[in-house]
Amino acid sequence: MHSLIPYGRQSVSEEDIQAVVGVLRSDWLTQGPVVEQFEKAVADYCGSRFAVAVNSGTSALHIACLAADLGPGDILWTSPVTFVASANCALYCGAGVDFVDIDPRTCNMSVDCLREKLEQAERHGKLPKVVIPVHFAGQSCEMEAIQSLSQRYGFSIIEDASHAAGGRYKGNPVGNCRYSDMTIFSFHPVKIITSGEGGMVLTNSSEFHRRLVRLRSHGITRDPELMAGESHGPWYYQQIELGYNYRMTDIQAALGLSQTMRLDDFVIRRRRLAARYDSALAGLPIRGISLREECVCAYHLYVIILESHRRAAIFEALRSAGIGVNVHYLPVHMQPYFARFGFTAGMFPRAEEYYRKALTLPLFTDMTDTQFRHVVGTVRGLLT
Ligand SMILES: *Cc1c(COP(=O)(O)O)cnc(C)c1O
């Protein structure tokens, strides 16, 4: 019996290892010159002006919300089909959270649902302060339409691009923030590139950038212009707001920087595997996520949506065959913790329908041909 084929895993090269070892032999272990290089490499890749590296994608979401001035009395909207962190970041800020149902074709936040919900919210005087579109599975949301709604209704946009590093929208890299205030990435090992744990906030605004840098490190500044009273001297710093220790280490940044060099190769490989799945599984009673013409999907996940409700049995059979299938995600509003905010099953029916039928197949850069053929053969055997 072979070991479980994971649904996702990192690809670490000898160069990656040497880069990390290089930092271990240097003077700096915590945030230092390599974090700066990593930030510059990702900002250059994406075409954004600024990037702020932090210790996780979740921390990136938290400080992005704080930089957007989200606080008590405010409300944040996101997709129900996402990892819990996209909603928890609102709760960390003392704000409320609500969800916008998905488009069943792309499984991204539906622009029509968003528009309708905004019209209703305006009537009730309860418009969101922040909206977090999540680029599910690696395909960008319809950012141009979401941006034009943001101009009409006055909310900030933070793109959760945890799945979408290396993806493109309307010809430009996801993360260039052309249609948003900020974009966040996660560098958890199952994501497209990794730094062990890690995340980053990208923005084109120097104001957001300054604020993010401060929030990452205790709310401390060394800029005399921002200080209360006179600076006492060159050693002097002040804490002017409540921040955190969300810093990334140079050890992590070395891995992330080295991986950034291979980001395009990773996405090409993932897209090739996804295309092979598409043709090898054609004709089965399943569908995939519909891709929009203006998007290049980075394929963090390869999701199939079954036509029947036999998901549990198929999941078990695949696991028994050594295939580490997964389900992304139980819609966040159905998490027990969210019941206290009044959320119940039935509120976001398209997300719930998707959840009942969805299955994530293994997809990762170093997947072998033997692994791939085993997955395809087993899935075909179960579904024909
Ligand atoms: C992974 C993920 C996060 C959180 O990232 P961490 O680095 O694990 O904190 C947030 N949102 C989405 C959609 C994710 O997939």
Image (cartoon, grey):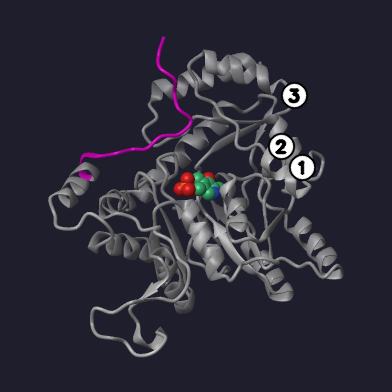
Residue drawn at 22 percent across, 54 percent down: 29
Q: Residues within 10 Å of mark 3 (few under 14, many from 20)?
A: few
- The quarter of the rendered structure image containing the N terminus is top left
Residue drawn at 40 percent across, 13 percent down: 2
Q: Does the magenta stretch mainly form a helix, a strand or a loop?
A: loop
Q: Per the image, is 155 magenta?
A: no
Judged left or right of residue 328, residue 103 is right
What SS does tag 2 mark?
helix
Mark 1 residue CB less than 8 A from any atom of ligand 1: no
Q: Quadrant of residue 326?
A: top right
The residue that mark 3 highlights is 309
Judged left or right of residue 88, residue 225 is left
Q: Earlier in the sequence, mark 1 or mark 3?
A: 3
Q: Amino acid at mark 3?
A: His
Q: Which mark is residue 354?
A: 2
What SS does tag 1 mark?
helix
The residue that mark 1 highlights is 350
Give the x, y percent position of residue 315: 61, 21
Q: Earlier in the sequence, mark 2 or mark 3?
A: 3
Residue drawn at 70 percent across, 66 percent down: 73
Q: Residues within 10 Å of mark 1 (few under 14, many from 20)?
A: some
Magenta residue span? 1-15
User: How far apart in space, not on screen, are marks 1 and 3 (Cα)?
Assistant: 15 Å
- Contact (Cβ within 8 Å) of mark 1 with mark 2: yes
